[in-house]
Image (tube, helix red, strand yellow):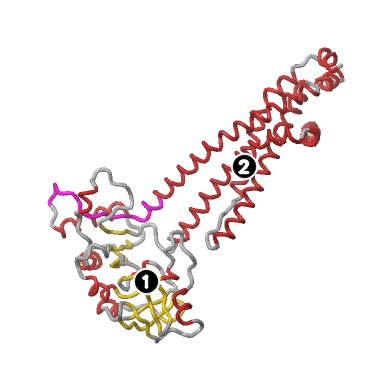
Amino acid sequence: MFFYLRLVKESFYFAINALRNNKLRTFLSLLGVTIGIFSIIAVLAAVDSLKEEIKGSISSLDNSTLYIMRFSFAPTPNIPNWKKEQFPDMTFDEYQFIANKIPNVEAATFQLNVGEETVKYQDRSITNVGIGAITHEYYDIESLQIAQGRFFNESESNSGVPVVVLGDEVANSLFDDFNPIGKQVRLYGRKFNVIGVLKKEGSGLFGNSKDTAVFVPVNFVRRIFGENNRFAFPAIMVKPESGIDLAEFNAMITQRLRLYRGLKPDEVTNFFVNQLQGFTDFIDNITGQMNVFGWVISGFSLLVGGFGIANIMFVSVKERTNLIGIQKSLGAKNRFILFQFLFEAVILAVIGGIVGLILVWIATVGLSQITGDFEFILSFKNMVIGFIVSTIIGLIAGILPALSASRLDPVEAIRTGM
């Protein structure tokens, strides 16, 4: 153990001496390792941050939640686009059929994905407000958190009365510190009674935070847009009971809806049952490809950095040939010389890697400050990966110089250095 500690100590001294005596050469050689580690860890940190933000955005939903609509979350190469454009929209009757006739459904909600609107209160107004036109079950499926008041109930939902639940930012902009419950806001040219305010959620990854939205009974909006409006994009959200076989449940819903729509066995299914798990798997696939791309691009920088470190070590062997001969003549074994130069190469690579990690940390802090709600994360796992990659680069780059140094003949080495 003492032998290896001594080796590390001497190797660290020689590495620092190389940095001190040959600043420009060592800097340029380590630059490749620094850039490579920075690139790899920056990509990994960005991907991890993206995953965490997506998980945060959908944390209120169960992965088993289904979205039934005429669009698919994933690519469908077996169905041409012109064919999908002809698919009919989901209907309110189909939502009622699923909610009341299909077993193992814990909750189902019907929603219209309509455009943004302007919400007014007295002389104040907010533009580009997202409209959540949904049925009352949405409250249970999304696990909404109410800060003031309540969500609309089944009776209000079915009758489509003009009541509204405000997002936190909308409520604060319209009412400041006043209690909005019981007040009236204008939307779609009508007066809506404010019955609730949601808790602050924070900005979503795709700008879809509930803080900047309002929620109204879908049946009120249906009267405005009509039943056959292709721009309303109706969808049915279904939350199955826990513990059931999801594949079997999906197949049952597909079969029941096909029968409800009167589709023949040879006709294509003209709707899509999208599972939230499928969306997260799609995101995982994309982020996985980003990781691979980052490793490939960073590999070129690491290759250059490895050659740079190998060059430093070969020069170091040449400059210290006389010292190697003296060490061997005094009884130093080949493995001592081998490990000495190998550890030196690893220390140089790790120094370059640490600089790269520091730059990533600075970048994550800076970007988090700039973007505000989106937080970039430099995890301990990624720091360990950076350290391990730096060590491997040092081992690979230093092995040939270390072998050449350990195989020097002591007499020839002393004579060469004289």
Task: Report crowding for label 1: few under 14, some 14 to 19, many 20 or more residues within 10 A (C-alpha).
Answer: some
Which of the 4 quarters of the picture holds residue 401?
A: top right
Residue at image position (74%, 27%) is 341
Residue 266: say if magenta: yes
Helix, strand or loop at mark 2 = helix
Helix, strand or loop at mark 1 = helix
Observer-nearest residue: 368 or 119?
Answer: 119
Q: Is residue 320 left or right of residue 92?
A: right
Asked if residue 309 shows in the view, the reply is yes
- For the residues labelled 2 and 1, the Cα–Cα distance comes to 44 Å
The quadrant the N terminus occupies is top right
In the image, residue 4 lies at what x, y percent? 77, 32
Residue at image position (68%, 39%) is 352
Residue type of the residue flagged with mark 2: Gly
Report the span colored magenta.
Answer: 264-281
Residue type of the residue flagged with mark 1: Tyr
In the image, residue 116 lies at what x, y percent? 35, 69
- Disc nearer the start of the sequence (2/1): 1
Task: Report crowding for label 2: few under 14, some 14 to 19, many 20 or more residues within 10 A (C-alpha).
Answer: many
Q: Is residue 201 left or right of residue 357?
A: left
> Which residue appears farthest toward the bottom when viewing the image?
182
Instruction: Tell which tag, 2 or 1, sits nearer the viewer.
Output: 2
In the image, residue 172 lies at what x, y percent? 48, 78
Q: Which mark is residue 386?
A: 2
Q: Is residue 389 left or right of residue 270?
A: right
Q: Which mark is residue 139?
A: 1
Asked if residue 256 shows in the view, the reply is no
Residue at image position (45%, 61%) is 57
In the image, residue 245 lies at what x, y percent? 32, 54
Which of the 4 quarters of the picture holds residue 370?
A: bottom right
